């Protein structure tokens, strides 16, 4: 009992430490939203009743979306500790046959399945059966997951821009002569410095940033309480929902349009779910309920109390309500907190890009694991610098004004609506929640978030187009890559080399078995890649021990180490098949692949028999002679007779393929052991 209590105490302390660290990464965007919510609203002659209605809307938005939806429900829809829209998509695909990932189509039905990881059990639900029957519904689900990822990446561009810009705007209060150009230039310099820090990893960044965010989280509500007492002690009457009804009855269409500004009060809440792989569910829940939620409720109450007495100060709603004696300390804290705010969505963007690369829906970019203890903690240099360029461009291009806020509102609510829909599917297909309870969740949230979506869509001409432009570009990249990979796989499956054909090729007198161990990488599971025939015919040789390696993506976050590598004999002497199984949160670069595969092969041999001992000796001799990793590089040759769609999409794919990284470095293979074999495929 005492050891159990000690373990529980240790877990609780670990959760408290993680809760503290989340302040520096997960909640930055959410807790700094008071900097820009009121300034983003186009208020016209607001009254006390208007402000009471707006505060009531913000209070219930924070309570329902923040506490009920994310903390209470969404954080439970993780996939082995990973969160976000793609984690939910993977979770759904594992519980019903609704995925259309290309890698799922090439697996043999005889292939051994994971015993511990397979989650599909029992009869699928009625909704699961509908998705299994309808390819249109499955494509729509995949499109929704991709759109959610693209919007989250757009969030990673806009959060740093609006947070830092809003904080630096505070210079213009005491110094009205400071121009917009100076504010924008200072913001750009700060953002460049932030992006340059990313390579040190989330843990180091959060350790550095958490004290700053803790200072912000605990000082703003104190100022809020002062403002409530000083300006309007009755502000909490606005918690009553009837103020919302009166607000819309009074303002009608204009009140509906103002929802585009109030939605920003919940910005960054999606990072709670998307950053789940970086922290823990309990840590995030503790931090939100004990500090973030009370801080926001009191800060917005204080801002609103000030504005009730100063109705026209909404354009600078944060800095105006800060008392003069603490203005400069709060300006410094606000600027530092805005930098921290940018971190939450940058970290989430790295996670999303890594997930997309792992499932082959995005061109390969370098992904670095920055923590030995937390596998979800990643950094992508290419992604980081592209984000930096786009973010600085937004600051310098849009500058001050409501345009960034309008764009931000579109991103915030679209990601949340997609999460609501996919969470509903999880409830029905996986959790088998009674439909009455599903309706109690879906109907109110869909109505609320749908109202927000309709309001922010009116902002598209005024800056809201930006996230759509970014999302369309990213979706085109994803679709172009997916289409090219699909066409390649179709060709490989149609022209694969069977084991019988391999035996025939090796039986030719001109073909020699040369000393050494060769790892030959293949994309297909049944049969061998067409490049093998091309290789043997041109080289007239094959290594004494050749292992055909296939990387197999499974719709799980992590694969058990004991089930990571599956090996089998393929017929001819010294020829083996090897499947390396991995999930989207696994790191393929960990460890020596050669040692792992040879170790698995040794376990596969029965060394008590003469044949098994011979195989083991052949493997060891080959390993000592030379080790080589062969990767086929199949390129499309788009002929004149090809259709216009193929010409465009495959040309685009070839461009992406030419600039992306090779898969072999991700496996940690030494440069001097790599060989690439080229082959043209005429379309």
Image (spheres, grey):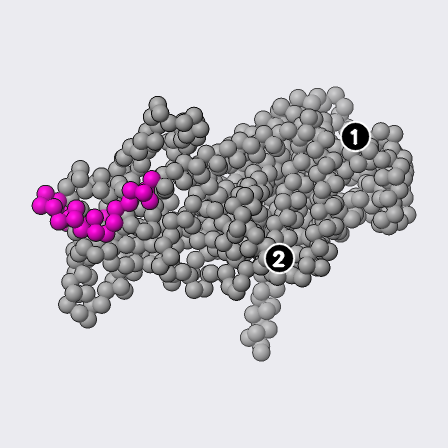
Residue 2 lies left or right of residue 413; in this view the side is: left
The reply to whether residue 306 is in sight is: no
Which residue is label 2 attached to?
428
First-in-chain label (1 vs 2): 1
Residue occupying the point 47% across, 50% down: 584
Q: Nearer the viewer, residue 528 or 469?
A: 528
Residue 242 lies left or right of residue 450; in this view the side is: right
Question: Dividing the image into 4 quarters, which one contains the N terminus?
Answer: bottom right
Res. 644 image quadrant = top left
In this figure, what is the number of numbered marks?
A: 2
Q: Residue furthest bottom?
A: 1
Q: Nearer the viewer, residue 536 or 486?
A: 486
Q: Position of residue 12 (x, y in %)?
A: 61, 64
Residue 112 lies left or right of residue 501; in this view the side is: right
Q: Secondary structure at mark 2?
A: helix
Q: Secondary structure at mark 1?
A: loop
Highlighted magenta segment, given as a residue range: 491-518
Which residue is label 1 attached to?
42
Residue occupying the point 38% across, 57% down: 109
Question: Dividing the image into 4 quarters, which one contains the C terminus?
Answer: top left
Indicate whether residue 32 is drawn in magenta: no
Residue 12 lies left or right of residue 405; in this view the side is: left
The reply to whether residue 389 is in sight is: yes
Indicate whether residue 496 is drawn in magenta: yes
Q: Position of residue 161 (x, y in %)?
A: 63, 33
Q: Residues within 10 Å of mark 1 (few under 14, many from 20)?
A: some
Q: Residues within 10 Å of mark 2 (few under 14, many from 20)?
A: some
Q: Position of residue 557 (x, y in %)?
A: 48, 54
Give me the C-alpha separation between circle 1 and circle 2: 40 Å
């Amino acid at each position: 009992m005492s050891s159990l209590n000690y373990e529980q105490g240790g877990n609780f302390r670990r959760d408290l430490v993680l809760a503290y660290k989340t302040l520096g990464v997960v909640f930055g965007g959410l807790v700094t939203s008071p900097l820009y919510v009121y300034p983003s609203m186009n208020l016209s002659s607001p009254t006390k009743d208007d402000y009471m209605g707006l505060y009531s809307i913000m209070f219930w938005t924070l309570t329902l979306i923040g506490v009920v939806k994310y903390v209470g429900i969404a954080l439970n829809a993780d996939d082995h500790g990973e969160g976000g829209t793609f984690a939910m998509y993977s979770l759904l695909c594992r519980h019903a046959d609704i995925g259309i990932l290309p890698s799922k189509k090439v697996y043999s039905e005889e292939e051994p399945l994971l015993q511990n990881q397979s989650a599909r059990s029992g009869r699928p639900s009625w909704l699961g059966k509908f998705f299994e029957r309808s390819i249109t519904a499955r494509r729509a689900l995949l499109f929704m997951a991709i759109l959610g990822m693209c919007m989250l990446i757009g969030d990673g561009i806009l959060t740093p821009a609006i947070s830092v810009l809003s904080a630096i705007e505070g210079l213009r209060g005491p110094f009205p002569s400071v121009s917009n150009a100076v504010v924008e230039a200072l913001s750009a310099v700060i953002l460049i410095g932030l992006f340059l820090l990313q390579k040190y990893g989330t843990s180091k960044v959060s350790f550095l940033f958490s004290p700053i965010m803790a200072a912000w989280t605990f000082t703003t509500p104190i100022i809020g309480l002062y403002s409530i007492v000083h300006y309007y002690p009755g502000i909490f009457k606005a918690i009553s929902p009837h103020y919302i009804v009166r607000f819309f009855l009074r303002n009608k269409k204009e009140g509906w349009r103002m929802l585009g500004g109030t939605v920003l009060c919940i910005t960054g809440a999606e990072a709670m779910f998307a950053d789940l792989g970086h922290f823990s569910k309990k840590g995030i829940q503790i931090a939100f309920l004990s500090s973030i939620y009370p801080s926001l409720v009191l800060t917005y109450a204080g801002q609103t109390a000030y504005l009730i007495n100063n109705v026209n100060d909404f354009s600078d709603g944060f800095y105006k309500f800060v008392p003069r004696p603490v203005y400069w300390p709060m300006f410094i804290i606000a600027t530092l907190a805005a930098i921290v705010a940018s971190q939450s969505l940058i970290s989430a963007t790295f996670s999303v890009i890594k997930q997309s690369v792992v499932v082959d829906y995005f061109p390969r970019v370098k992904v670095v694991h920055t923590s030995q203890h937390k596998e979800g903690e990643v950094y992508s240099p290419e992604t980081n610098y592209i984000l930096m360029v786009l973010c600085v461009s937004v600051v310098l291009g849009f500058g001050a004004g409501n345009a960034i806020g309008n764009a931000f509102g579109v991103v915030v609510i679209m990601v949340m609506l997609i999460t609501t829909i996919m969470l509903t599917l999880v409830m029905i297909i996986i959790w088998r929640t009674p439909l009455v309870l599903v309706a109690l969740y879906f109907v109110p949230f869909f109505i609320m978030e749908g109202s927000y979506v309709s309001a922010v869509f009116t902002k598209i001409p005024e800056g809201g187009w930006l996230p759509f432009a970014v999302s369309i570009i990213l979706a085109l990249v994803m679709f172009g890559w997916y289409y090219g990979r699909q066409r390649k796989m179709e060709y490989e499956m149609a022209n694969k080399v069977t084991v019988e054909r391999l035996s025939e090729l090796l039986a030719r007198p001109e073909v020699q078995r040369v000393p050494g161990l060769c790892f030959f990488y293949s994309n297909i599971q049944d049969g061998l890649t067409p490049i093998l025939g091309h290789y043997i015919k041109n080289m007239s040789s094959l290594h004494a021990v050749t292992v055909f390696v296939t990387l197999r993506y499974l719709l799980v976050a992590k694969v058990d180490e004991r089930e990571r590598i599956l090996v089998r004999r393929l017929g001819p002497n010294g020829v083996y098949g090897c499947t390396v199984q991995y999930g989207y949160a696994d790191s393929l670069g960990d460890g020596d692949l050669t040692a792992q595969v040879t170790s698995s092969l040794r376990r596969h041999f029965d060394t008590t028999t003469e044949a098994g001992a011979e195989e083991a000796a052949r493997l060891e001799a080959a390993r000592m002679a030379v080790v080589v990793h062969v990767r086929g590089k199949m390129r499309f040759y788009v002929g004149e007779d090809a259709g216009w769609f193929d010409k465009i999409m495959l040309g685009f794919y070839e461009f992406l393929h030419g600039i992306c990284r090779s898969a072999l470095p991700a496996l940690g293979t030494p440069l001097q052991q790599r060989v690439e074999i080229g082959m043209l495929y005429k379309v």
